[in-house]
Image (tube, rainbow, N blue to C red):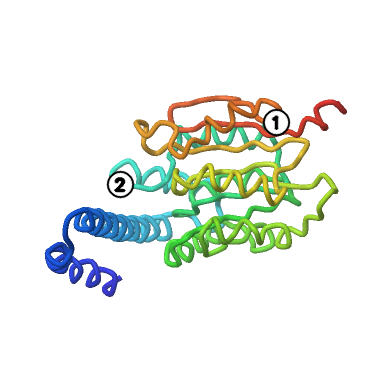
Amino acid sequence: MLFETWLVVASVPLLPALLVVASGRCRVQVAALCRGALARALRMLRGRVCVRSTHSFVFSECTHGNARSVLETFDLYADTHPSLCIGPQTGEALDEAVGRVRPCRVLELGTHCGYSSVRMLRLLPPAGRLVTVELDPLTAELGEEIILVAGFKHSQFQVLTSSSAEAIPTLRSLLELNRGTGEGLNLVLMDHDPERYLPDLLALEREELLCPSGCSVLLIHRNRRAGDRGGILGHVRARPDCYSVESELQFMTEIFYQQESTKENK
């Protein structure tokens, strides 16, 4: 944490020097790159501080081994502090989707503090399994600890510390899915970078990881003004042969994937 803080602080004085060296169009591009890098670094630091403080509160205040207590403690913390958790309102919509789909294999992109992981795991069948992907190593570690505190075992879930682009190609072997068998993910929760929603959906299609008989994809919208960032809804609406928009809530959209051949067989 100290190293990352130092890195951001040390990089700020270098920005004017970089701009002096650059000229014309190059100067504009360098300025944009520097601003983008600094913004990402600051977001990472704020996110880490949020995850650390949330984890500390939940870990010390909840009843260990009780998933309901863990969720209630998350909500209690979020009442008075900034939080990366989706919150009870979106959480109830997530519960409804999980209860309706009754998935056996779930992929979560964006572990954050472990809140959504706990909500989903408590509703999965005994043979159900969750794979959750988190880019930041510290966030992944703390999120995994909270999932364990909620009473779940590693046989029920796995945390992958990597980018979504790196994780998706590994899922077939990780979940022991054979091509051509009709197996796949039944539920996907996307709560990471909205700009990655469409590329990752396309990667899931390409890897044939979406269950052909039906897979619900839940898109979390943390910024209500962001709109269709990444163009994922445009892609879905352009493919009525296999996609449909099931619901559009304030903070979450559910889309449904099903191959045409499986529709005809029903």
> Badge 2 is on which residue?
82
Residue 200 image point, x, y percent: 56, 48
Residue 181 image point, x, y percent: 85, 48
From the viewer's perspective, is 195 left or right of 31?
right
- Secondary structure of residue under mark 1: loop
Amino acid type shown at disc 1: Cys
Amino acid type shown at disc 2: Pro
Give 41 or 76, whichever is nearer the viewer: 41
Residue beneath the point at 51% across and 25% down: 248
Give 239 or 71, whichever is nearer the viewer: 239
How far is disc 1 from disc 2 in space, using C-alphas?
38 Å
Residue beneath the point at 62% across and 56% down: 168
Tell me which label, 1 or 2, sits earlier in the chain.
2
Residue beneath the point at 51% across and 43% down: 197
| Quadrant in which residue 264 is drawn | top right
Residue positioned most to the bottom: 3
From the viewer's perspective, is 51 left or right of 262?
left
Discs 1/2, front: 1
Residue 233, labelled with which disc?
Answer: none
> Badge 1 is on which residue?
242
Residue 146 image point, x, y percent: 49, 59
Residue 15 image point, x, y percent: 16, 64
From the viewer's perspective, is 105 left or right of 33?
right
Quick one: label 1, few (<14), some, or many (20+) residues within 10 Å? some
Identify the image quadrant of the C terminus. top right
